[in-house]
Image: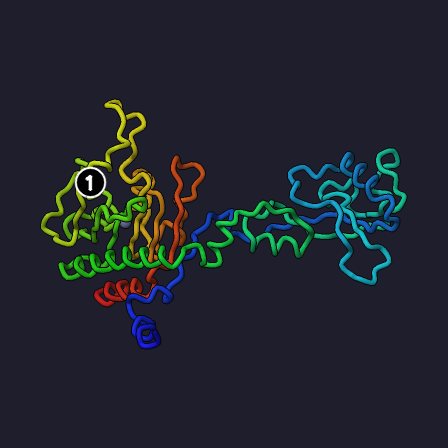
Amino acid sequence: MEPQMKRWKGSEFDTDSWVAYPVLSDEQSQDVELVEAFAAPIVNKKETSRLVRELNGLYPLDGLQHIKRVRACKEKDSPHPLEVLVCLVSDAPDRKAVSIDSLLPSDGVGRDGLGEPFVVKVPARPPLTRPQFELASKQWPTSFHEDKQVTVALRGELFSPPQKAAMHMYMMSAIAAARAGKEMGMEAVGAVVVNPATQTIIAVGHDCRGDHPLHHAVTVCVDLVARSQGGGCYSFDRYPACRFTSPTSDTFQNVPDAEGSSQPYICTGYDLYVTREPCVMCAMALVHSRIGRVFYGTASADGALGTKFKIHSQKDLNHRFEVYKGVLSKQCEGLNKLDNHIL
Ligand SMILES: [Zn+2]
């Protein structure tokens, strides 16, 4: 086994040489925002449930349902084992001379069992990812509804070795197309559209903007997918590396009635592999074509799927999709260097 392992390790077939990480939305990637609150020690533990009930009535902490009201005291030797959130600093009746008396009007909450208040910071929003949850929990105990797929994806472990081998092969096709385009005087960018259900390549395209300013690799590829379905606007016949696969009969098995009200869009259910992060125009073309997932090799300075914008996660657009970056990153960086060399 050993000689074979050596031959594959570090070669262009080595799927361990890259990791695909998800490009998450701003909400999922941002830092944990904190707000100040008053907490107080519970000096008599028996009063805890009454205090929580009465404090929830007086200061309900609207919008902060992810925050736990009571926490165990951090210092082990503390005379009081529990601390309770009284209210947000912004909700306090008098923020200057703060005492437990000033925070609790006499007819609202019985102060028995409560010590003097102090300021803590609590997470302003529910955590969306495990890293956010871990940071938030350092400040104050926080509940977390974990999306396991996101957690595994952030560790770079979402895809199994056979899946990675297939992804590797698709990106190699995109790289080969980029090189072919480069040889014909275009920018070294390549793209491949794949049907993951059948594991077939539908279209392969490369940058053709020497012919037309809008013919970036991604738009070329989307047009070739349209051609494979009997549509498409352009001919790329003079570029042998730009090609599409004519669909088999079962590809159209879901095409409904002539009205086409539920007819799939051009790229419904398909994956795109592209050597470089797409620009805004290409990202919008992917939204319109209803792409399923996008995998790219390297980031672009004006990239619209993570670097400058995150068009795939815009809530006000009518289609969103998953994006992963880093597939064959070193080889894709090598392509970018070819272009930079010319510039
Ligand atoms: Zn583009």
Task: Return the x and y of residue 249 as percentages of the image width and height.
Answer: 20, 36
Q: Which structural element holds mark 1?
A: loop
Task: Return the x and y of residue 167 as percentages of the image width and height.
Answer: 32, 56
Q: Is mark 1 within 8 Å of ligand 1?
A: no
Amino acid, disc 1: Pro
Give the left or right position of residue 152, taking residue 224 as reference: right
Q: Residue at x 40, y 41 (%)?
A: 320
**Closer-to-camera residue (133/58):** 133
Task: Return the x and y of residue 205 as percentages of the image width and height.
Answer: 20, 51
Quarter of the rendering containing residue 291: top left
Q: How is the image coloured?
A: rainbow
Q: How many marks?
A: 1
User: What residue occupies the far right of the structure in this picture?
Assistant: 112
Q: Residue at x 75, y 43 (%)?
A: 87
Q: Quadrant of the N terminus?
A: bottom left
Q: Quadrant of the C terminus?
A: bottom left
Give the left or right position of residue 48, taking residue 162 as reference: right
Query: Which residue is tagged 1?
Result: 247
Give the left or right position of residue 50, taking residue 135 as reference: right
Give the left or right position of residue 307, taking residue 224 as reference: right
User: What residue occupies the far bottom of the structure in this picture?
Assistant: 3
Crowding at mark 1 (Cα within 10 Å: few <14, some 14-19, many 20+): some
User: What residue occupies the far front of the structure in this picture?
Assistant: 1
Q: Residue at x 83, y 60 (%)?
A: 78
**Closer-to-camera residue (124/42):** 42
Task: Return the x and y of residue 139 as percentages of the image width and height.
Answer: 67, 54
